[in-house]
Amino acid sequence: MKVLILTMILAISCNKLLKKEEEVNPLKDKLTKLQYDVTQNCSTEPPFQNEYWDNKEDGIYVDIVSGKPLFCSIHKYDSGTGWPSFYDIIDDESVKESDDYETGYKRIELKSTSSNSHLGHLFNDGPNPTGMRYCINSASLKFIKYDDLDKEGLGNYKKLFNQNED
């Protein structure tokens, strides 16, 4: 009888802990299911069926979780993969790299240093001048249009677009 009571108490306690964990995860309220799965569970969104794969507007792509600027539209190109692809990042310190063997071969996973969110993968088949392809899930990004950079407190990033004119 004591074992049964202890088992019931343990089960109730575990259930309460699980519910508390679900309740205190503000990211589940902030993000869509796809954004959460991509950024927190390292999922991948479908190619050609995502928000930014063919976006051609000028602006900055920020981490959907932290708001940290990651990529600039001047570095974006059509890789033919169906995901947003960039040949460079704004700040080398904003993204961390790690080996990923989930598919059975080595890839380089990219995570945001500010939120530890999964972004995508890095490949060495990109265009000049870097030869790199930052293949990124749209679900991990928020796009800030060039005209909205000042309003969003990111006006200092406008200088990146002037560099492209040189």
Image (tube, grey):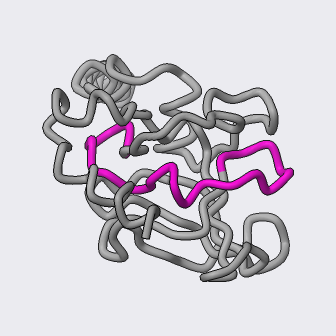
Front residue of this view, candidates 163 and 56: 163
Q: Quadrant of residue 137?
A: top right
Q: Is residue 66 magenta?
A: yes
Tell me residue 73's x, y (percent): 51, 49
Q: Which residues are magenta?
A: 63-84
Q: Is residue 157 magenta?
A: no
Image point 78% across, 35% down: which residue?
A: 46
Task: Answer left or right for 143 relative to 133.
Answer: left
Image point 49% across, 43% down: which residue?
A: 39
Tell me residue 54's x, y (percent): 71, 35
Front residue of this view, candidates 138 and 41: 138
Q: Is residue 11 visible?
A: no
Q: Quadrant of residue 146?
A: top left
Front residue of this view, candidates 93 and 156: 156
Tell me residue 17's x, y (percent): 27, 28
Looking at the rendering, in which quadrant would you find the C terminus?
bottom left
Task: Answer left or right for 89 relative to 131.
Answer: left
Q: Is residue 67 visible?
A: yes
Task: Answer left or right for 28 relative to 98.
Answer: left
Tell me residue 64's x, y (percent): 38, 37
